[in-house]
Amino acid sequence: MLDHLVKTKPDCYEASCLLGELLCEQERFKEAANVYHEALKYKPADFDLYYNLGNSYYKMDNIAKAIVNYEKALVLNPGNGDIRFNLELAQSKTVDKVTPMSEVFLVTWMKNLTNTMSEKGWAKLGIITFILMLLMLALYFFSKKIALKKVGFISAVCLLLVCFVANLFASNQKEKAQNHGSAIIMAPSVTVKSTPNEGGTDLFIIHEGRKVTIKDNTMKDWKEIQLEDGNAGWVPTSVIEVI
């Protein structure tokens, strides 16, 4: 029965997810990955599917593919601890160990705070705080007691600040999801060039699973990439997969 479903392909999202789970239980991870890929046709922005894909590829020891899918899941749900843990586990199996450039503590803290929720999470918080702010303003304007007016005014100001920050973070998360400015190296090893051609000077070598930032995306066959430590150069488009 299971083999028949794999051959015929499930006809909806729920059936695909169930079949993928059953295949994983039987350690048929390659077939499970194919099924999850099919499921993405029904829900292309489902973090659970990318997470399950990452797990399937990890079990197949395809670390680069696992990292790509964990990263895609994390873009859609940046506050998920399970995704982040599995991503770090996969990254620990890569060859390259790059030291990130140092950042001001406040910048790092703001990034971590932004990543505690997805775009939708921050947007919902913004709506809730806006409604609460209106209620506190109503308390301020219509209450006859001075103490309640003070509570209403101070609460409204605080909620306005939270609403502003939530919308700012939601916008930031949306931009990250749409920007696609990062990629994963998929080839076992890649020589980074000083210019976008094979005749360029060899700068350094990076390996499978390394996350890079795309600096120049204007060319079809070559991309300028940058590592976390600031090193940059050109690699063929064929050796990377955009997150």
Image (tube, rainbow, N blue to C red):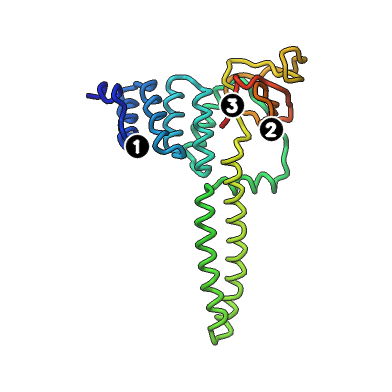
Secondary structure beneath label 2: loop
Residue ID for mark 2: 100
232, above or below 48, in the image: above
The three-letter code of the residue at mark 3 reads Ile
The image shows residue 172 at horizontal and vertical percentages of: 61, 48
The image shows residue 233 at horizontal and vertical percentages of: 73, 23
Please report the residue visible at 58 percent of the width from the left and 46 percent of the height from the top: 173
Residue ID for mark 3: 184
Please report the residue visible at 29 percent of the width from the left and 24 percent of the height from the top: 8
Q: Residue furthest top?
A: 199
The image shows residue 22 at horizontal and vertical percentages of: 30, 28
The image shows residue 23 at horizontal and vertical percentages of: 32, 25
Secondary structure beneath label 1: helix
32, above or below 152, in the image: above
Secondary structure beneath label 3: strand
Q: Is residue 242 visible?
A: yes
Horizontal side of 25 relative to 228 (left or right) equals left
The three-letter code of the residue at mark 2 reads Pro
Image quadrant assignment for residue 154? bottom right
Can you say which quadrant of the picture contains the N terminus?
A: top left
Q: Nearer the viewer, mark 1 or mark 2?
A: 1
Can you say which quadrant of the picture contains the C terminus?
A: top right
Residue ID for mark 1: 13
The three-letter code of the residue at mark 1 reads Tyr
Q: Nearer the viewer, mark 2 or mark 3?
A: 3
Q: Nearer the viewer, mark 1 or mark 3?
A: 1
First along the sequence among labels 2 and 3: 2
Please report the residue visible at 58 percent of the width from the left and 41 percent of the height from the top: 178
Q: CA distance from mark 1 to mark 2?
A: 39 Å
Please tell me how crowded label 1 is: few (under 14), some (14-19), or many (20+) other residues with Cα within 10 Å.
some
